[in-house]
Image (cartoon, rainbow, N blue to C red):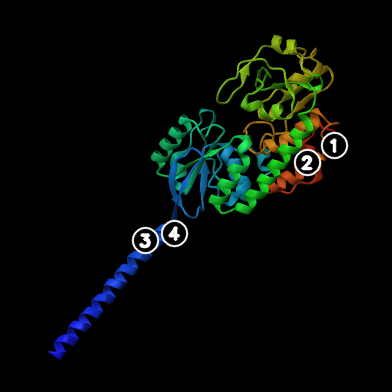
Amino acid sequence: MIKTRNFAIAFLLILSVMICTLFTGCRDKSVSQQSTTQTITDHAGRALTIPAQINKCYYTSPLGMIMIYSLAPDKMVGWSMQLTDKEKKYIPDKYHSLPFLGGLQMNGKINTEELLKAKPDVIFAVGPDALTDTTKSDADKLQEQLNIPVIVVDGDIKSTEKAYTFIGRLLGVGDKAKELASYCNKTMNEVTEATQAIPEEKRAKVYYAEGPKGLATEPKGGSHALVLDLVNGNNVAQVEAKGGSGMSSVSMEQVLKWNPDVILAWGADAGGAYDLIRTSQDWANINAVKNNKVYEIPNYPFNWFDRPPSVNRFLGLKWLAATLYPDTYKVDMVSEVKNFYSLFYHVDLSDADARELLKNSGLKVN
């Protein structure tokens, strides 16, 4: 009887240990699973389950690409725009070998086959229209197609701090995000404070010449002319805004009628009309040409004005404010260029490098 009772007790002890072990194992497995993922809500209000630690990521356009590059370049799996040799000059060698995987900007396509081989943990969709139904739908479709979480981020210039903070937290680079957001906030405040009080009669009359003939432009209020608006330039273009990539067509007669005091143009390397405008007789009677105020927008590695319209525009704000209103906004642009490129592009420039970037930009530098 005693032996039977002892056997029963022993059996119960063994059974309890097995149950406890099994329960603990399940619990540990559950905890482990929870620790490898997290649930977030993106800026479009979409709930997503993503890895707790993001080691690799991609982006649907250069807007997100530049933000990620400035924050955590070692987490990039590729470029969403094809880099030229001149652009690579301003990017560290270690990132030159990243593949071009395409993007959805300007009706482009992502090389989904190669992207899947790169195995990004998440994809960022950064844009100024993050809250629209179209953006949400496009993100959902891409996510379903690739089975990779697509995170929508508000890319409006006024939401830069929010975007950097959000992405920086997800990528584990919060301190860097804070540093970059601080620079952007300080720049915006400095430039707008210096230029917004300029009376209308003293505002520079500016025409933004796009394309190989200079006969495409962006009107006031358009997303691609935002830098000009923020520095309180007088955008002379009175045309209908085009959605998407912009570039409203205009005639030579319209430009002559507007007669701008300053013309901003792309350089030849960017497929622009800077040289044409300065030398063609068609443009010769415009005040900007007569007074040698045709300026080439600095373009390396990313255009300072709007294409792509990402955080590269914050350096553009300083350049354009100092160019249009040198008596109102005074800044050592050589120093500013070197600081920005180190902080955002991870490359150290010489004074000569900075001056080369500013060569035809309208600024007189020492």
Question: For the view shown, which residue lies furthest in the bottom direction?
Answer: 2
Residue projecting furthest to the left: 1
Tell which circle, 1 or 4, labels the residue nearer the N-terminal end: 4
The answer to which image quadrant residue 37 occupies is bottom left
Q: In the image, what residue occupies the spot 73% across and 34% down?
A: 317
Nearest to the eye among marks 3 and 2: give it. Answer: 3
For label 4, the SS is helix
Q: How far apart are marks 1 and 4 (CA)?
A: 53 Å
Residue 28 in the image, given as x and y percentages of width and height = 37, 66
How many neighbours does mark 4 have within 10 angstroms: few (below 14), some (14-19), or many (20 or more)? few
- How crowded is the residue under tag 1: few (<14 C-alpha within 10 Å), some, or many (20+)? few
> Reading the chain from its start, which is encountered first: label 3 or label 2?
3
Q: Are marks 1 and 2 in contact (CB under 8 Å)?
A: yes
Say which of marks 4 and 2 sits in front.
4
Q: Distance between the residues labelled 3 and 2?
A: 54 Å
Q: Earlier in the sequence, mark 1 or mark 2?
A: 2
What residue is shown with label 4?
35
Residues 167 and 24: in front is 24
Q: Is mark 1 on a helix, strand or loop?
A: loop
Q: In this view, does 350 lie to the left or right of 148?
A: right
Mark 4 or mark 3: whose residue is earlier in sequence? 3
**Label drawn at residue 116:** none
Could you tell me how far apart the alpha carbons at marks 1 and 2 are, in whole angstroms?
Answer: 10 Å
Numbered circle sitting on residue 354: 2
The image quadrant where one finds the N terminus is bottom left
Amino acid residing under circle 3 = Ser
Q: Mark 3 points at which residue?
A: 30
Q: Is mark 2 on a helix, strand or loop?
A: helix
Please provide percent x and percent y for residue 357. Answer: 76, 37
- The kind of residue tagged 1 is Val
Mark 1 to mark 3: distance in Å? 62 Å
